[in-house]
Image (cartoon, rainbow, N blue to C red):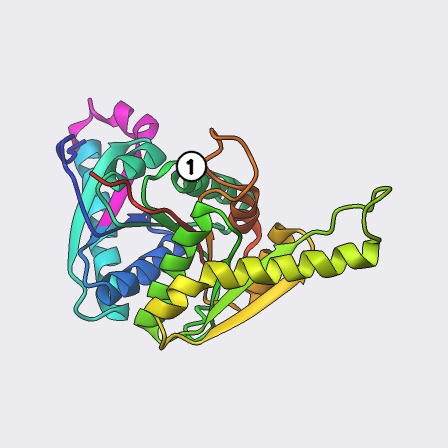
Amino acid sequence: MAEQRADTRVSGVVVRVDGTRVSNAAVAWAARAAVAHDELLTLCLVLPADRVDHLLDTPDLAAATQQHGEYLLARARAKAEAVAPGVRTTLHLASGQPAAEMLRLAENADLVVVGSLGPGWTDRLVIAATATQVAKHAPCTVVVTRLNRYRAKAPVLVGVDDSDGAQAALEFAFDTASRSGLEVHALHAYTVPPPLPGLPRKSDLARVSRVAGQECLDDALAPWLEKYPHVPVRREVCRGPASRAVVNASLDASLAVVGSRGRGGFAQLLLGSVGHYLLWLASCPVAIARTPAKP
């Protein structure tokens, strides 16, 4: 199986291609993003090594497999050019472990796009597993697309708390909304601690928690409102688990954005609980935002 050199590096937007409807949705989203950011779009198809290795001793089958991969990439390029005229593309065909190859390409990329939610349970689990691995471990922002109607004019939803990850999410959300002429829906969810002897009553705790949540949202938004004064913003502070609130709000969003980690968790957890919920349950594409490491 012919494969691009191991030292190949790409920049811009990278999208996984596999010939499925899930992949087509990812290619369409990635093509629009590449044009909006004036970036190169790399279409990447990875043939699983365990299905390819046994073909190496059969030249005809190996050649046919590579030709089929090249055909799928050419079809994906045509899809990208159809939905985003003017998009600049390059093709990457390799064999190996799909998630590992996507993560390797992500090292120098600005954005990685992968599809999720396949048509059947087996495909669903395989595709979702790849998407989850890439979302958890990529050093750049990852967008996981959905196989549903593209709501182009719906707001960009962003989950907000007082973490560094939330600032990366706000940066990506405002930039996306600015380039697309969309509204930002900034959502902060809070919980009320249980009343304890000597502390305020439950009703007082609820009021204090809501005020604190509003202040948290206002403080987090302040620098982005100054940088993007033309972007309309809808603020929402709601009571309850953040994961449930963001998943519910994704029904009316074109994109849901969260940081790679929230306030809780351990240092080794690269994806917070809200991100996990969104990857499996969101009704729109999901962005796990990261600020690229400085060289």
Quadrant for the C terminus, please. top left
Q: On the image, which quarter does residue 4 sit in? A: top left
Where does residue 192 sit, x and y in percent of width and height? 73, 51
Where does residue 73 sit, x and y in percent of width and height? 23, 51
Vertical side of 224 occupied by 65: above or below: above
Where does residue 19 sit, x and y in percent of width and height? 33, 51
Magenta residue check for 55: yes
Q: On the image, which quarter does residue 3 sit in? A: top left
Residue at the outermost front position? 198
Where does residue 149 sit, x and y in percent of width and height? 47, 68
Residue 55 appears in the rendering: yes
Quadrant for the N terminus, please. top left
Q: On the image, which quarter does residue 286 sit in? A: bottom left
Q: Which residue is mark 1?
A: 133
Vertical side of 27 occupied by 101: above or below: above
Q: Nearer the viewer, residue 64 or 159?
A: 159
Vertical side of 163 occupied by 76: above or below: below
Residue in view at x 31 percent, y 57 percent: 27
| Magenta segment | 43-60
Magenta residue check for 10: no
Residue in view at x 49 percent, y 50 percent: 117
Residue flagged by tag 1: what amino acid is it? Gln
Does residue 30 appear to the left or right of 224 in the view shown?
left
Q: Nearer the viewer, residue 208 or 280?
A: 208
